[in-house]
Image (cartoon, coloured by chain):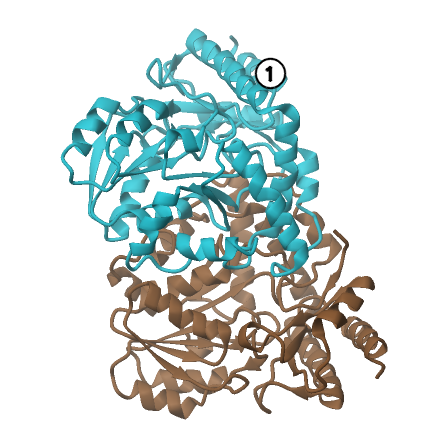
Chain colours: A cyan, B brown
Amino acid sequence: MKYKKLYIPGPVEVSKDILEEMSHWMVGHRSSDYKELHSAVIPKLKKLLFTENYHVFLGTHSSTGWMEAAVKNCVHKKVLSCVCGAFSKRWNEIAAACGLENDKYEVPWGHGYDPVEIDKRLASGEYDAVTVVHNETSTGVMNKLEEIAEVVKKYPDVSLLVDAVSSMTGVKIEVEKLDVDVILAGVQKAFALPPGLAVVAVSPKAMQKSEAAKNKGYYFDFKVFEKYAAKDNTPTTPVISLIFALNKMLDKMFAEGLDKRFARHLEMAERVRGWGEEHFELYAQPGFRSNTLTTIKNTKGISVADLNKKLGEEGLAISNGYGKIKEETFRIAHMGDFIMDDIEQILSAIDKILGF
Amino acid sequence: MKYKKLYIPGPVEVSKDILEEMSHWMVGHRSSDYKELHSAVIPKLKKLLFTENYHVFLGTHSSTGWMEAAVKNCVHKKVLSCVCGAFSKRWNEIAAACGLENDKYEVPWGHGYDPVEIDKRLASGEYDAVTVVHNETSTGVMNKLEEIAEVVKKYPDVSLLVDAVSSMTGVKIEVEKLDVDVILAGVQKAFALPPGLAVVAVSPKAMQKSEAAKNKGYYFDFKVFEKYAAKDNTPTTPVISLIFALNKMLDKMFAEGLDKRFARHLEMAERVRGWGEEHFELYAQPGFRSNTLTTIKNTKGISVADLNKKLGEEGLAISNGYGKIKEETFRIAHMGDFIMDDIEQILSAIDKILGF
């Protein structure tokens, strides 16, 4: 197995110091050592998410676990699944697999949600929750979360459930101001950690809803997490190595400064978009282009597999398209620890291979 | 935070080379690199569990996740929860939290299950599954899995669901010969890896049952795992660092030899039991004493907290009792990479502190 620098939208490239932190010796998860770690991490996450009053939980599972948790704890009536790509579609499938009543509001791939359309549907009074993917990792669409949140605020009985899997820490998300009920992410995307840990912020309103939820199981029950959180702990043995690494990474984020971090992501995105428009086309509609990854339409009919093979020989990797647009698109991630030099490195490597 | 050598029943002490493997660079989970890793690990796990025909899945979650999966996929009618301590009790709570019909067969803490009693209950025809904890980490009881399996074989419609969380790799478990339907473990116990990954073996019969299970959700659906396993993959982003570490650890296990490994665990157990009987009493009934951890009755009324504090000053840690026997017992784990020298180290340290 040969090392490749990852420009794929997760797991992303992880820096050497963070990989080294993954080697931290073990501590008992019911020990004061773990308590010390846990109670260091949670306030930093709250600061990162601009919240004081929400619960923030550490989930030893992938982001998908929190997606399942969100609907299990917060859907009593019927959920409106807003679908704009593979991962938002999966959230609908998860709701159905949990036996929950659901409807889809679907836009074509590459498009973002229209808040007016969401408003119209919620006005029916049928729904008590809506699932929204902020940053669709398959299409490179970043939805207008603030506008959607404004709409959902009109319906106090509707929980706003947000997948920020590939945007959290790359884009400013003021959780409490937005009044979202559940917002989740995995740490292998813009956090730039190895996978296996997912973070969620849960509103007091969602915690109340969880209390009344039936057949929600144990592993994804917010109320169980709340009980253990009161003791700076988790219900089951957590993925301790990743929590050590997360603690170190959060310090690095604040050392950079959040505003600088968000600006860096935007700057990298603009560079990749410009390159994509120069040589191909962008898959996401104007106004909906992600700050953390760019999905590029393969208008030149290149072989993405060949391109990636040649990049691999130079120790680099980008991603092909996802799901039904696997062959028609390719994706370049520009998130996590990357700086402009990293972006120039991959773009010039592609330029050279494709003869641009 | 000061380093302590862990004699607690998980997370256990992790060797330096395994901790270093946790620093492995990342690979894309849909890449050929990950496929290579996944397809190296699964056959080794099958060999470890003495099975060829079962599915073995890698779960990015704690063992509790597979406990929830087991009942969700395999209980259509009613489950008999065999309870002999805190973790077997939790399995019953999980079944209830999933909205499943359930009954308890309960024995006093420190006792093991009586296969005759299980037989009697299954004979009612009420149940289509039974949950059994092989090695109760709270009480140090190791149940007679072979005898229980013989009983359950009489009832072909009853799924035998086994928690081998703290026994797997420390004790020989011939999965296929036993005809268990689901058997699960976390890697932070006798596997001697950091926590965050759990392993499960699932029988073809259990896979069929999963197909008919309703409202089982997505994250813990065996059928979803099966679909991705066919591509040497997992449904969601797995905890890649731990899978690299697991691969290395499996090689170490086979290099030692499984029989030697099981014998080593027994030998360490006998030493700790002897010491426990000399100075205190053993909590588990004769014939039911675990090969991987020993729960000792605090007959001398020592302060376990003080003892652990003094051990901590020497860079060592044992565990207090669990749940309702927190103060009345303490626990010494003798599993994973430990050899007799490690056991002598902790026992002589305790001897010195307590003046034995």
* Left or right: B274 in relation to B170: right
In the rendered image, is residue B294 in sight?
no
Residue A38 percent across, percent down from the top left: 60, 49
Crowd rating for badge 1 (residues with CA inside 10 Å; few <14, some 14–19, many 20+): some
Q: Residue at x 68, y 79 (%)?
A: B263
**Residue B179, relative to residue A58: is it above or below?**
below
**Frontmost residue, B252 versus B76:** B76
Q: Residue at left 60%, top 70%?
A: B169
Q: Quadrant of residue A282?
A: top left
Q: Position of residue B42 (x, y in %)?
A: 51, 57
Residue lying farthest to the left in this orientation: A124
Residue B199 at x, y percent in the picture: 50, 61
The subunit letter for the residue under badge 1 reads A
At x 64%, y 76%, the residue is B293
Q: Is residue B8 above or below residue B134?
A: above
Viewer-side residue, B305 vs A29: B305
Say if B252 sits above or below A351 in the image: below
Circle 1 sits on which residue? A340
Mark 1 residue type: Met
- Give the residue at the far front of this rendering: A53
Dividing the picture into quadrants, the one containing residue B348 is: bottom right
